[in-house]
Amino acid sequence: MLRLRQICLVASELEPAVADLEAVFGIATCFHDPGVEKFGLVNALLPIGNNFLEVVAPFRDGTAAGRYIERRGGDGGYIVILQCDDIPERLARCEKLGVRIVNHMDYGTYEGLQLHPRDTGGSMLETSWSAGNGAPDGPWHPAGKTWQEAVKTDRVSAMTAAELQSDDPDALAARWGEILDVTPQPITDGVTLLPLENAVLRFVLARDGRGEGLGEVDIHVSDRDAVLAAAKARNCPTDGDVVTVCGTRFRLIS
């Protein structure tokens, strides 16, 4: 089992980014994790159905997140977090491939492997296991114990794709496929997919001038007009079915 469960965005300031996400997508914050303070960060978790958007923001100088903002020229996508059921096998695979683990989290009911971005390319990548037999609506430690109570699906209900951009998307897709043990599926010239249980990872050519990184998220909408109206009211850029919030493009999928 390999499922898209969480997307982490990075912002220079937490509150404005969270306010935009809540207003545009009609979602609510379920948890602030005090555990990220040791990395010089504050955060917020917002459920979209049984997926999660996380926003992290540095509160001191010299953080990895702050350097990432500087490198990519502003707020944007930061970490792709996948839910799996085979942490020991994935740890062994990383060791075999020489992929460094920068953070091995183990809370008893939750265990996660955060991989070194220089060994993955694209963005930070994390695979995590949670108690609950892999149930889509089951527990998820980063989101707190009562995240289900915060779910609001009037406008949006799921994240269905994460898009990684690169000057060499085929090579990046091959590398992620090797790490995740998923066979890449070329779609067109310069576009390759890695299929997951509930979503796809899409690899495309970088065209926005921001270089390699997590550039776009596909989000299933039930009220497209309300999302677009709210985005315009918040002065968030829109382009057809794409809304940009926190430096990240969100493609609205009906």
Image (cartoon, grey):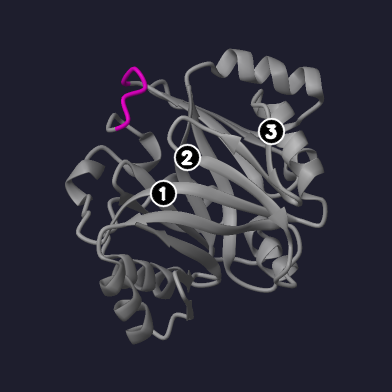
The reply, left or right, for residue 82 in relation to residue 117 is left
Q: CA distance from mark 2 to mark 3?
A: 14 Å
* Of residues 224 and 2, the one drawn nearer to the viewer in this rendering: 224
Spot occupied by residue 202 in the image (x, y as percentages of width and height): 61, 47
Q: Is residue 173 above or below residue 16?
A: above
Spot occupied by residue 133 in the image (x, y as percentages of width and height): 34, 17
The residue depicted at 27 percent of the width and 60 percent of the height is: 27
- The tag on residue 184 is 3
Q: Which residue is mark 2?
A: 199
Which range is magenta?
132-136
Give the amino acid at mark 2. Answer: Ala
Q: Is residue 254 visible?
A: yes
* Sequence-first tag of 2 and 3: 3
Q: CA distance from mark 1 to mark 2?
A: 7 Å
Residues packed near mark 1 inside 10 Å, few (<14), some (14 to 19) or many (20 plus): many
Q: Which residue extends farthest front?
A: 188
Give the amino acid at mark 1. Answer: Met
Q: Disc 2 vs disc 3: Cβ atoms closer than 8 Å? A: no
- The answer to which quarter of the image holds residue 104 is top right
Q: Is residue 87 above or below residue 3?
A: above
Q: Is residue 177 above or below residue 229?
A: above
Q: Disc 1 vs disc 2: Cβ atoms closer than 8 Å? A: yes
The residue depicted at 56 percent of the width and 57 percent of the height is: 40
Q: Disc 3 vs disc 1: Cβ atoms closer than 8 Å? A: no
Secondary structure beneath dot 2 equals loop
Q: Which quarter of the rendering shows the C terminus?
A: bottom left
- The tag on residue 159 is 1
